[in-house]
Image (tube, grey):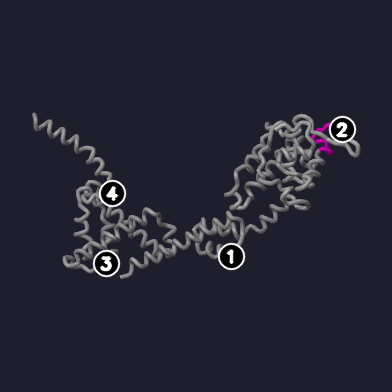
Amino acid sequence: MDTEGLSIPEAIRKLFGVDVAKESPLLKNKAMSFVRNKLIAVRKEPKVDRKAVYLIADQGYVLHNALILNAVFPNPKDVKRIFEDERYRTDCAAVVRRLLTDRGSVLGEALQSGSSDKMASFLADTERDLRQEWMPNPFQVLPQVALGENTTLLHALLAQAASLEPADSFLLAYLNGDWEAAQELSSQITSGSPELLAIKTEVDRKLNEAYEFSELLSFFRKK
Amino acid sequence: MKLHSAILGLSILIAPQTIFAKEGPFQYRDASLLINSCQEAVDVFSSHEKTGYLAAYRTSLSEALRAGYCIGVLEQFLDAYEGDCDGNSGWFENAQRIASLNLTQSESARTTTFEILAEYACGY
């Protein structure tokens, strides 16, 4: 994907399919802060009312990777440091792995595409060039766009972790064969994502089947 | 000489069918299906006694199907030969006795399903 000569909003539309003017001024501001702290190199052209900036060759990689990292690390200074400091980059790779893979909800992990893991591996491998390669993007929608101002991914993950329990323990109870608990918890779930409801339906179906089976066994043993 | 080649030809004709027949499900000259099925039946019901409705969790589809085969065969046998059977045990007790049989492969291949039923499914 060639982004040479594009303005920042044009490049973001090309890389992430996001129209920053309409959907996320926040994402544009974040991208501009990478221009200001000189992580992203640009060519400046004086215009009538304000200066316009255009990406120079290969800066699409930097913009792409910086915005993905920014989803996890809100401070542009930290993102820049990841590009420049290998040790720090390795530490951050561990954070990404913990946040996006190890600590995810059971449900989340089961549904995850595996790209979070790929992102963490890419980041951990300092042979991979953040300025010359596309880092795997684990986000369907960049959190900056989905969550908006004031909510970093870190906060969202913390909130998610704090509120995980019902769905998770319901699934865990079921997988552990604790069907009594699974049933109890399943009955508390009244809304949720289609995936969660699909799992709930499946668990309920299994439980009904178990009761039917049990009744049939009793029926056969009746003298 | 003629007889010899005739037998040879016959055995060539029969051989593939014998192999096929060996793989068929219901070998009434092989008691192992009934014995295995009754073992599954006893297992399923003892699991049901111990764990209630969780028996479904511990029973696979094929175990349940085998158990059903055992129950059906024993129950129908009891019904059909009621007049000739003097015991009064139900299918489950009979299944327990058949399940505890310990036949070797060649023994069960020489024993018919009917022989097992006549001996063990007729009540005490």
Same chain letter for marks 1 and 3: no
Same chain letter for marks 4 and 3: yes
Three-letter residue code for mark 4 = Pro
Please tell me whether residue B11 is drawn above or below residue B30 in the rendered image.
above
Residue marked by disc 3: B90
Residue marked by disc 1: A188
Closer to the eye: label 1 or 2: 2
Three-letter residue code for mark 2 = Glu
Extent of the magenta region: A35-46
Q: Which chain carries label 1?
A: A
Alpha carbon separation for disc pair 4 and 2: 83 Å
Query: 10 Å neighbourhood of mark 4: few (<14), some, or many (≥20)?
Result: few
Alpha carbon separation for disc pair 4 and 3: 26 Å
Alpha carbon separation for disc pair 1 and 2: 60 Å
Residue at x 60%, y 47% (from the top left corner):
A112
Proximity of marks 4 and 3: CB atoms separated by less than 8 Å: no
Which numbered marker is on residue B25? Answer: 4
Quadrant hosting residue A166: bottom right
Same chain letter for marks 1 and 2: yes
Residue at x 76%, y 40% (from the top left corner):
A79
In the foreground, B53 or B25? B25
